[in-house]
Image (cartoon, rainbow, N blue to C red):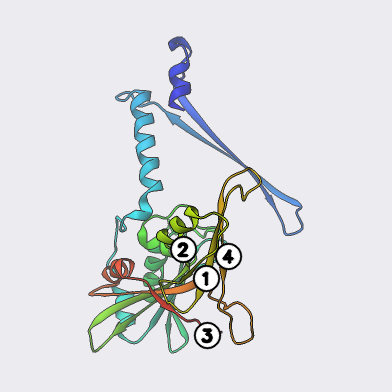
Amino acid sequence: MKDVYLACPKKDRIAYFLWINRYLWKNDKGEKVAKELEIVVITKPKDKTWNQLIDEGLKAKEERETAYLRPPSHTPTLSGLHQALKKGAKLHAFRSGGGTRVVRLEIRDDLAGYGESITLEDALRRANDNYLKIKPRKSDKNYLTGQSLAASNVDAIALQGYSIDAWYDTLAELYYVQYLEFCHREVPEKVIAQAKSQPNVPVVFRDTASTRYLYVVTFVPGMFANGEDGTSTKCLTTSIDGGVPDDAYFYHAQKLGSGKNIWEAFQNAIASPSVEVKIIK
């Protein structure tokens, strides 16, 4: 946008930008049911140039796109949520099919608090208010989908589709947060280097994470249709039924953290080492 603006002759430069979004809503049968046109008018303040506005916009865009690397900028106290967990409630959070973040607060399988929003932080706040029976705010809209970019490293957990659980340990007097990652078994770099040094010759290695499975990797020049080189990996270990083990290529890893409040527990869980766990079906 900045390049286009600077390319225009000064006499043709505009005084405002128009951002137009056109929405076409369809039902399950694919039939058109509604149309919506959203027009956003961005006027130029007197005390700023367009170049300044564009630079600010690019900076804000970069901050939004890298927010998944940082803790939440705002962490409400969530007094109701902490109170419920101390009473024995369990918190379960996840991403819905539409992408909204959902938080359920349950006491002995009964729903005690519920929150749903475009980010996990706001869903936690809504579940807290719902537990305390606080009347929803005027700004609390109902969303069909969630935010496509993570608002923080906490929101990123839910956005990636990981299921989150939280509870309070009365003996340790700490809050705990746990979630499961879905990981891919990586081929060690030294094994790839060995395979590249001898093309088309299989190299056998054992998985470094669990050491349970034996693999073979082969470097194949011109493996892909576009002529690019590639590697193929195959698991040599078989399961009881003679097939490939369910977690031979992908596995679940637990992340667990504790803290004096749920926000601290979240950050410690994110920083904790991944521990492979076996999911019993």
Q: Amino acid at mark 1?
A: Tyr
Q: Position of residue 76 (x, y in %)?
A: 29, 64
What secondary structure is marked by label 4? Answer: loop
- The disc, 3 or 1, on the residue closer to the chain's N-terminal end is 1
Give how far apart the Cα atoms at labels 4 and 2 are: 32 Å
- The disc, 2 or 1, on the residue closer to the chain's N-terminal end is 2
What secondary structure is marked by label 3? Answer: loop
- The disc, 3 or 4, on the residue closer to the chain's N-terminal end is 4
- Can you identify the residue that label 2 sits on? 187
Assess whether mark 1 and mark 4 are in contact (beta carbons under 8 angstroms).
Answer: no
> Mark on residue 97?
4
Give how far apart the Cα atoms at labels 3 and 4 are: 24 Å
Quarter-of-image position of residue 145: bottom right
Give how far apart the Cα atoms at labels 2 and 1 are: 9 Å
**Point 33% across, 27% down: residue:** 52
- Can you identify the residue that label 3 sits on? 280
**Point 38% across, 35% down: residue:** 57
Marks 4, 2: nearer the viewer: 2
Density class for disc 4 (Cα within 10 Å; few <14, some 14-19, many ≥20) is few
- Can you identify the residue that label 1 sits on? 215
> Residue 208, can we see it?
yes
